[in-house]
Image (cartoon, rainbow, N blue to C red):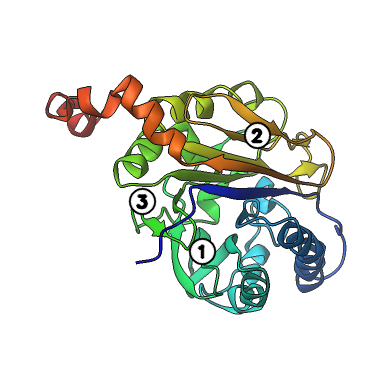
Amino acid sequence: METKPRIVRCGLIQASNPKHEGTLAEIKEAMIQKHLPMVEDAGKKGVQILCLQEIFHGPYFCAEQDIRWYETAEPVPGPITERFAEYARKYSMVLILPVYEKAMDGVYYNTAAVLDADGSFIGKFRKVHIPHTWPGFWEKFYFKPGNLGFPVFETAYADIGIYICYDRHFPECARILALRGAETLFNPSATTTGKSQYLWELEQPAQAAANGVFIGANNRVGLEKPWEFGEFYGSSYFVDPRGKIMVKGSADRDELVFADLNLELIREVRDGWQFFRDRRPEMYDDIVDFIP
């Protein structure tokens, strides 16, 4: 059996939306076209696992409730995964592609597709926790809650887990993925100044330390329509199993953020803290049983 590398170069893309006017197809294509050279750049820099931002192929449309955005959803696997498989193969790069998924007419999910380094589709994660909060996060209008659980994807370079944006506020997501063997977790997001910014560098470093894993979190940048309540603040980062931020992107610029993750650090940290040895799951029934 081929041994996986223990130092893996992972990357995150943060990008602004380049086109606000035109047909939905034109807006979607403009965002895809913007990402293609950024994916190429990541490949040329030796990135082995690359994660794009939440619903990367368009604006964060959940700021309004309008059924026209349903037209931008597509099957997974589907046109976008087929299109990006070429780049996965070209650069032997694992790609995490967060897209708007159409499961059937009238049923849509906030989804992340995973392509392995040979371009093959190896699975998908569907966002589990769906917010519907003021101002402008009207996601229940667009997404059905995910029903695929928390899969761990065994890629060519590392075993990875994904949870999307709002899922990061629920520590159970990171815990179950770590218990299932994920070494690096990815959290593609779309979040703005104001309500949640103070949590951005608080929650996930804590979860990385609590679970002894690497976490990569990315966020889009800039102002975009139909969002009119705040600015996306980027600040994408990787954090190590000790909870230390390794690298962080700017707050206002399109950027590839990447870092070399030494997966041997996971065992070193866990052997020191022993959180998984000392946890008492038989004592936690109330977490599941309590329904207010």
The x and y percentages for residue 215 are 52, 38
Query: Quick check: 33 left or right of 10?
Result: right
Q: Which residue is mark 3?
A: 150
Answer with left or right where residue 161 lies relative to residue 71: left
Sequence-wise, which precedes: disc 3 or disc 1?
1
Q: Amino acid at mark 2?
A: Pro
- Image coordinates of residue 121 in percent, x first then y, are 49, 73
Question: Label 1 neighbourhood size at 10 Å, few (<14), some (14-19), many (20+)?
Answer: many
In the displayed structure, 213 sits above or below 70; it is above
- Quarter of image, res 216: top right
Tell me the crowding category of disc 3: few under 14, some 14 to 19, or many 20 or more residues within 10 angstroms, Cα based. Answer: many
Q: CA distance from mark 2 to mark 1?
A: 31 Å
Front: mark 2 or 1:
1
Q: Which SS class for mark 1?
A: strand
Mark 1 is on which residue type?
Val
Q: Which part of the image, by quadrant, shows the C terminus? A: top left
Q: Which residue is mark 1?
A: 114
Q: Is residue 79 above or below residue 251?
A: below
* Residue wearing tag 2: 135
